Image (cartoon, rainbow, N blue to C red):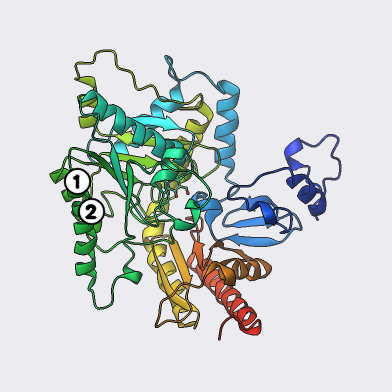
Amino acid sequence: MTRNDNPAIAPAATIIPDTETILERDEYVIHPWECFDRRHLESRTVITRGEGIYVYDSDGNRLIDGPGGMWCVNVGHGRRELAQAMADQAAQLAYYSPWSLSNVPAANLARRLASHAPGDLSNVFFTTGGSTAVDSALRFVAFYNNLKGRPEKKHVISRADAYHGSTYLSASCSGKARDKNYLDFERGFVHHLASPNPYRRPDGMTMAEFREHCVKELEDKILELGPDKVAAFIAEPVLASGGVIVPPPGYHARCLEVCRRHDVLYISDEVVTAFGRLGEMFASESVFDIVPDIITSAKGITSGYIPLGALLVSDRLIREVGDNEARGATFANGFTYSGHPVACAVALRNMDILEGDGLLEHVRHVGPYFQARLRTLEDLPIVGEVRGMGLMACVECVTSKQSRMPLTMAYEIGSRIDAHCQKLGLIVRPLINMCVISPPLIITEEQVDNLVALLRKGIERATDDIRREGLWS
Ligand SMILES: Cc1ncc(COP(=O)(O)O)c(C=O)c1O
C-alpha cells in the first residue's frame, strides 16, 4: 500500500488511497466493454504509477506493461519531457478554438506529420482519438462524393476481425463478431469481407493463393455492389484488436490496385501501427508498400500521455473538394478539442523522443527478436499460433493444434493467463482465447526474455487450471 505522508499539502495527483478505497470509488465508473451482470464481482488491478516498461499497482507490485497501456505508451512510462511539454504549453496557452483561429503546436504538428506521411497525404485533420479519426475519415469520404455529384457512392467495405473504434460509424466498420450482439450498427452501407487471417486459411491453400482469394473477394464485392456505389475500403495494416492478424504478404498492395481500378478510396487505419510500433512513423508505405488516400492515427501519436487523433488526407482529394462547383461547401465536422494545443505540444515532443532516442531503429532491431522469442511458446500444447510483426504480437490458444479451433469464451483462457501473469509480474491483454502483447518500444532484449518467461509460466498455470477443472485434456 502506498500512502502519502502529508495529504493536506501534497498535490492531488500524489494522494493514493488504499486499494479497497479506490475500488469502492471505482464502482461509480462504467468501464469500456462493461459486462453489467458481473460489474462489481471482479476486482480490477489499480495502476498508480509507471516507469519505463513497468507500471506499479496500488499495492506496490511492479508489473511489465505487456500491452503498452492499450498499444499506445510507445516511448514508455514516466517520461518527464512529455509532462514538461504538457505543463509548459498549458501555462502558455491551454486552449483556444480551432474553428477560425490557429495555434502554434497544431500548425507545427500538422507540418511535421505531413513530412513523414507517404505520397501527397499532407492535409491533417485533428480529432480526439482513433474512433473520431475513423469517423471523420468516413464523413470526409461521404462529403467528397456528395461534392463530386455522386451521392450514391456511399458503401464502405471492411473485414471480419477489424476494429475501427467506438463511434456509431467506426463501430459499424468494425468486424469483431462478439461486439455486434447488443448494439445497433449501420448495416445498409457497410459490408464485411472474411478475415484475411492466414492461420485460418483453407487447408492446402498457399499464402499466395490465399492472398489472391482475399483480393478477389474484395473485387467481387465491389462488382456486386457496383463500383459507382462503393466509396471506400477501410483496413488496418495489421488487424490489431482482432488478434494481431498479419495479412498475407502483398495483400494490401493488391487491394489498393483493385480500389484504384474501381475508383474506390483506400483508408489505412494506422491507429495502432503508426509512431514506431512497426519501426516506422507510418507503416502504410514503408512496410506495406501502399500510398492510401487517407491515413487515420491516434494512440502512439502522444504515447497515450494525452488524447489526440489525426487523419491525413491526400492533396488530390483536397484539391477535388476545393475545385468543386458547390462553392462555399463546408466540411461540417470537427471537435472542440481538434488540434488541442497541449495535446499537439505533447505529440511534437513525443516525435522528438521517437527520433532523438532512435526508437524506430530500435524497434526494427528488437522487433524480430521479440517475435522469435515469443514464437518459442508454440511448443506449449494449448498454443495454436504466435503471430505478429514489429512490437505487436498475439498468442492464440486452441482446443488442439490439429483442429486450430479457438477455445471459446467459456474457458476464459485469456483472462486466466492474464490473472496468472499479473501474479508473476506481467500484464497481458486478454481477448477471449488470445493474449495480446505490445510493450513500450523501449523494451530491451533482456526484458523481452523476462516477459516471455513470465508469459510461459502464466500459460502453463492457466492450462493446469482448465485441466484440473476437466475442461481441457
Ligand atoms: C485500428 C484502430 N482504429 C481505431 C481505434 C479506436 O481508437 P480510440 O480508442 O482512440 O477511439 C482503435 C483502438 O484500439 C484501433 O485499434
Q: Is residue 148 left or right of residue 241?
A: left
Q: Nearer the viewer, residue 141 or 189?
A: 189
| Mark 2 lies on residue | 218
Residue 410 picture location, percent across and down: 58, 70
Q: Nearer the viewer, residue 439 or 158?
A: 158
Q: Is mark 1 within 8 Å of ligand 1?
A: no
Q: Nearer the viewer, mark 1 or mark 2?
A: 2
> Residue at 22% of width from left, 51% of height from top?
221
Question: Which quadrant of the structure image shows residue 109?
Answer: top left
Check disc 1: other Cα within 10 Å, few if <14, some if 14-19, many if 20+: many
Determine contact: label 1, label 2, CB under 8 Å. Answer: yes
Residue 450 picture location, percent across and down: 56, 71
Residue 351 picture location, percent across and down: 43, 41
Residue 352 in view here:
no
> Residue at 51% of width from left, 58% of height from top?
439
Quadrant including the N terminus: bottom right
Q: Nearer the viewer, residue 65 or 262?
A: 262
Q: Could you tell me how far apart the alpha carbons at marks 1 and 2 are, in whole angstroms?
A: 9 Å
| Mark 1 lies on residue | 259
- Label 1: state its secondary structure: helix
What is the three-letter code of the residue carrying label 1? Cys
Farthest residue to the bottom: give it: 473
Q: Is residue 98 above or below residue 60?
A: above
> Residue at 38% of width from left, 21% of height from top?
332
Quadrant including the C terminus: bottom right
Q: Is residue 178 left or right of residue 282?
A: right
Residue 123 picture location, percent across and down: 31, 30
What is the three-letter code of the residue carrying label 2? Leu
| Among numbered discs 1 and 2, the one appearing first in the sequence | 2
Residue 436 in view here:
yes
